[in-house]
Image (tube, rainbow, N blue to C red):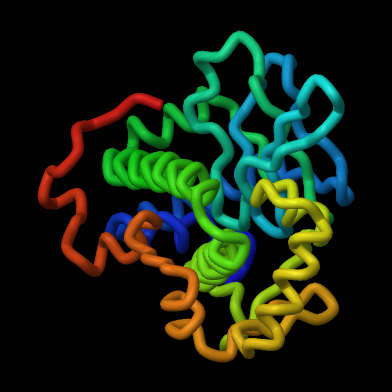
Amino acid sequence: MTNEDVLATRLSNFTKLSDEECQALRMLARDRVRRVGARVDLVREGERPRSVFLILSGWAYRYKTMEDGRRQIVSFLLPGDLCDLNNFVLAEMDHTISALTALHFVELPHERVAQICEEFPRIARALWWHMLSAISTQRQWTVSLSRSAHERIGHLFCELFLRLQTVGLTRGNMCDLPPTQTELAEATGLTPVHVNRTLQEMRAEGLIVLKDRILEIPDLARLQHAVLFTPNYLHLGQAEAGTSVEKDVAPAVEI
């Protein structure tokens, strides 16, 4: 799969797309391609949003900085993700989007997104699913604050693995995991020391193997059971389940 295919692959999990629609998404992925290094902010809190970001390769994340300088990561953004489709209504950003790794992304003007939605209603509805999945995932991150450290970290690992698997970026039971322990702490509401101790315990239990920024999950079903992970909030495989636009389950949208 090429970078140009990643958006079509991602949206095809929500809606069955035609060859013409997939080609339109490939063309969208060629618009205004940008490259930045790791730890570079794409847009900062307080700035006026200028476009929608489509992640082609690499990882990004959203974060908030508190008054005392502490940082909270509120989501990880993976290839195929679109950042803030509806940010055109904002006068200013209420969070920062930053590159976690070297990043290839597309800056999509809001007018371009609106145009493709008008031309291809099924793409518009797939984008609705994309937004609903992102909102549902954010709810799960909130729920994770009530989970144990094992459950928080294991839940995050299951989620990231399945999201990467959706766009063909896993290798058997392995995937890249570039966040540092400090960044995992900022994403889970734990301290780096607590994250380190929890990772050691999960390794000892045979739930994970983590080395050189590569995560291996020897038995995904076992890890999911151990951390009480249910993947339904990701809404993957909606197209295969028959929840497609042909059923008219969602209205036409303007984004």
Quadrant of the rendered structure where residue 252 is? Answer: top left
Q: Is residue 187 above or below residue 165?
A: above
Q: Position of residue 105 (x, y in %)?
A: 70, 47
Considering every residue shown, the one lying at the far left of the view is: 247
Q: Residue at x 46, y 63 (%)?
A: 9
Q: Nearer the viewer, residue 147 or 156?
A: 147
Q: Nearer the viewer, residue 17 or 70?
A: 70
Quadrant of the rendered structure where residue 4 is? Answer: bottom right
- Pick the quarter of the image with the N terminus: bottom right
Q: Position of residue 123 (x, y in %)?
A: 35, 45
Q: Is residue 47 above or below residue 32?
A: above
Q: On the picture, is 139 further left or further right than 65?
A: left
Q: Position of residue 208 (x, y in %)?
A: 65, 82
Q: On the picture, is 163 further left or further right than 53?
A: left
Q: Nearer the viewer, residue 232 or 117?
A: 232
Asked whether residue 27 appears in the rendered view, the answer is no
- Pick the quarter of the image with the C terminus: top left
Q: Is residue 68 above or below residue 99?
A: above
Q: Residue at x 69, y 42 (%)?
A: 73
Q: How many marks?
A: 0
Q: Residue at x 71, y 38 (%)?
A: 72
Q: Residue at x 55, y 49 (%)?
A: 81
Asked whether residue 7 appears in the rendered view, the answer is yes
Q: Position of residue 54 (x, y in %)?
A: 61, 44
